[in-house]
Image: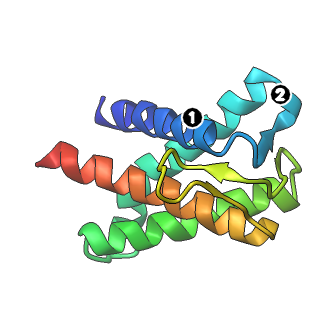
Amino acid sequence: MNKVQKTIQNILIFFFVWAIVRKSIIIGGGVFVDELGAALVFGLIAAFTNNVLKFFKLPVNLGSTLLITIILTFIYLFLQISVFNIINLTGQGINLGIDLIGEVEIQDKTYALVLITMLLSLLSVLMEYLRKK
């Protein structure tokens, strides 16, 4: 049951980040099934990150979990963008909701990919870390 909860939590994190960067990312032409499928696969990847660490006999701590989550999320998003063409990055402005920063203009799709990867990975790992505390 723990993996199901982690998967659902990461699906919700995916939709939260997607709502923030909605102007910059288009998933599957607006069909909800494509959006849910992309979120479900991300949820499964993030939920089984600790199993990947245990498989390679690496220590399971905050740093290694964050590193592996960043790597797996980047690979997943890169494959979705370049190979499967389910996710399309437009590179438009992103409003993070902070008045001090304002709207962030992203000039390149690679920067958008890295920003989305970092947001998803950080939120996923920090939510799991806070849940354990």
Q: Relative to residue 132, is residue 112 drawn left or right? A: right
Instruction: Quadrant for residue 20, please give it.
Output: top right
Which residue appears at 84% of the width and 35% of the height? 28
Height in image: 40 above or below 117? Answer: above
State which quarter of the image contains the N terminus.
Answer: top left
Residue 118: x and y, percent?
Answer: 52, 64
Height in image: 40 above or below 69? Answer: above
According to the picture, the residue beneath numbered tag 2 turns out to be: 30
Dot 1 falls on a residue whose secondary structure is helix
Q: Relative to residue 91, is residue 46 drawn left or right? A: left
**Furthest residue toward left:** 133
Which residue appears at 28% of the width and 48% of the height? 128
Q: Is residue 73 visible?
A: no
Estimate how packed mark 1 is, as few (under 14), some (14 to 19) or many (20 or more) residues with alpha carbons within 10 Å: some
Amino acid type, label 2: Gly
Height in image: 36 above or below 122? Answer: above
Q: Residue 15: which disc?
A: 1
Q: Is residue 117 visible?
A: yes
Pointer 2 or 1: first along the chain = 1
Height in image: 67 above or below 94? Answer: below
Residue 83: x and y, percent?
Answer: 87, 59
Find the distance from the CA under tag 2 to the CA under tag 1: 13 Å
Amino acid type, label 1: Phe
